[in-house]
Amino acid sequence: MTTVRDVLELVRAPAALTVLGDTAVGAHAASGGFGRRGWLLPLASAAIYSGGMALNDWADRDVDAVERPERPIPSGRVRPKQALAVAAACGVAGLALAAAGGGRRSLAVAVPLVAAVVAYDVVAKPTAAGPLVMAACRALDVMMGARGSSRALPAALTIGTHTAGVTALSRGEVHGGSAAEVGTALAATGAAAASVDGVAPSVQTPLARAAGAAGAAGYLVSALPSQLAAADDPSPARVRDATRTGIGSVVPLQAALVARSGSLAVALGLTALDGARRLLMARRRAGDVT
């Protein structure tokens, strides 16, 4: 029988914490923060992300049966039809939350976001376009928080750049990485950090600029060591570690972008969220070991 724990594993529940800050980045870059019901938009992001994870495992079920037989579908803990139902339910919930939190303008971004997630999982993932499609997913997530405002485009491109690098790196998780994949990740990390200062040209206070610079440095400290280790030894284990770290290091990047937009309180909140995510992942790994 499928359990709640099996479903949470299917949707990568801890990883969903990494998308909560996307809409905050967009909202602060566009208009200085969320509107009255804007707090629903991070929940929309989490729902769409979770649906994408379930759809990813449904689409990869035959490959996972060989490469990752411990996952919920190949292990028999979740049936393929159940995974597809979870994916659909999460997608619908995400669209409803986007409409409730940001109105028609956020919904107008959420619809192509869901379409991009489906396209990545079902078509683009194994192709050369995969990293760019995944980058588009995360950029659209930022734009959903911005309700489509062009003022958030620089921030969305920064998150998208980071995502493209991590996605390129992830291709070596099973068989080991290549110099090109690791180099792409390193270049993307450097470009994302360098672009933080330009995401909010209308906010030029010394405090905002200093906070953004400090946040960008924190992001580099979070992301670079494991990527450099993978460059030295691109074995599957090193690449998997760098990929996991890269997925999580988007939260310090989100905090840097929000801080640069002038909201130190929200940036500190995202930093606290990152700490909670790290603790949760550490406990989960300890449980796997024991």
Image (tube, grey):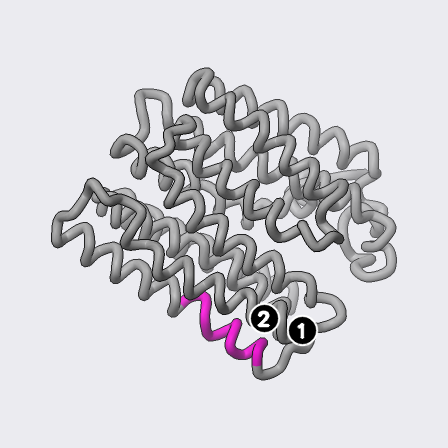
What secondary structure is found at the residue carrying circle 2? Answer: helix
Amino acid residing under circle 2: Val
User: Where is residue 219, by image quadrant?
Assistant: bottom left
- Label total for image: 2
Asked if residue 280 shows in the view, the reply is no
Lateral position of residue 283 relative to residue 290, left or right: left
Pick the front one: 81 or 22: 22
Q: Is residue 229 magenta?
A: yes
Give the percent coordinates (x, y) of residue 290.
Answer: 64, 68
Q: Which residues are magenta?
A: 222-231
Dots 2 and 1: beta carbons under 8 Å? yes
Which image quadrant for residue 185?
A: bottom right
Question: Which residue is the site of mark 2?
Answer: 182
- Residue extending farthest left: 206
Please, what is the dominant secondary structure of the magenta stretch? helix
The relative height of residue 191 versus residue 7 in the rendered view (above or below) is: below
Which residue type does callout 1 highlight?
Ser
Give the secondary structure at mark 1: loop
Q: Which mark is residue 178?
A: 1
